[in-house]
Image: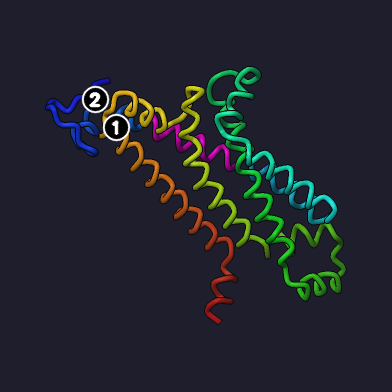
Amino acid sequence: MNTSTGSGANPWFSWEYVRRNSADLVAALEQHTTLTAQAVLVALVIALPLAAAAHLRPRLAGPLVGATGVLYTIPSLALFGMLAPYTGIGRTTVLIGLVTYALLVLVRNILVGLQGVDEDVRDAARGLGYGRARMLLTVELPNALPSIVAGVRLATVTTVALVTVGVVVGYGGLGQLMFRGFRSRYHAEIMTATILCLLLALAFDLLLYLVGRALTPWSRTARTT
């Protein structure tokens, strides 16, 4: 891989660098994108039943949120270091760490959304003979969707940034290019990887915003009214 611009200058951005290293950039961006999407999806699959259980059993809410909060406070470098002896160096270690950090945001937002459902809506469902499980699945979760989508958006943007730390175990997506740029003091490599991270975060956020609008058409109607 050739990072030279062909001159003595070391600019913060260089189209020549992008042209010569397009294959590396695409590979790193693909790794970053798939790892982010997979981590958030796995975290959501875990967080949904946990938050639902805490909603149905309020005594679980405090310990559950507290436990995810403690996990979130573990420094990423330390977490990857603790996982590496058991899960090895690479994708699995980074994925477990990212899922761990996303859980706090998702569990809190899902729980807040479920707890914020209008009590009149619950009363109407009870009047129609809805049991607790049916009410959760068909009434409370749909009404909590705006809060859930907001949590997924926040967790996704945060995860895009955290993926770069995976460079310490050899799987950091665009973070690999940033680290290589810092080591060689090549500014264009650092800046290009940083810009791609920002664009990726914006693209994910916009996509999830549109998905949220599609899933909650009633919220748009309510705001208009």
The alpha-carbon separation of the residues under discs 2 and 1 comes to 8 Å
Q: Residues within 10 Å of mark 1 (few under 14, many from 20)?
A: many
Q: Amino acid at mark 1?
A: Glu
Q: Position of residue 78 (x, y in %)?
A: 59, 28
Q: Position of residue 107 (x, y in %)?
A: 68, 50
Q: 182 or 98, which is in the foreground?
A: 182
Describe the element under mark 2 as helix, strand or loop. Answer: loop
- The answer to whether residue 133 is above or below residue 50 is below
Give the mark, 2 or 1, whose residue is nearer the N terminus. Answer: 2
- The answer to whether residue 213 is above or below residue 174 is below
**In percent of the image, x 46 and y 49: which residue is there?**
204
Is the residue under label 1 in contact with that under label 2 (CB below 8 Å)? Answer: yes
- The answer to whether residue 214 is above or below residue 181 is below
Q: Is residue 56 left or right of residue 156?
A: right
Report the span colored magenta. 27-41
Residue topped by disc 1: 189
**In percent of the image, x 29 and y 32: which residue is there?**
189
Magenta stretch: residue 149 in it?
Answer: no
Residue topped by disc 2: 3
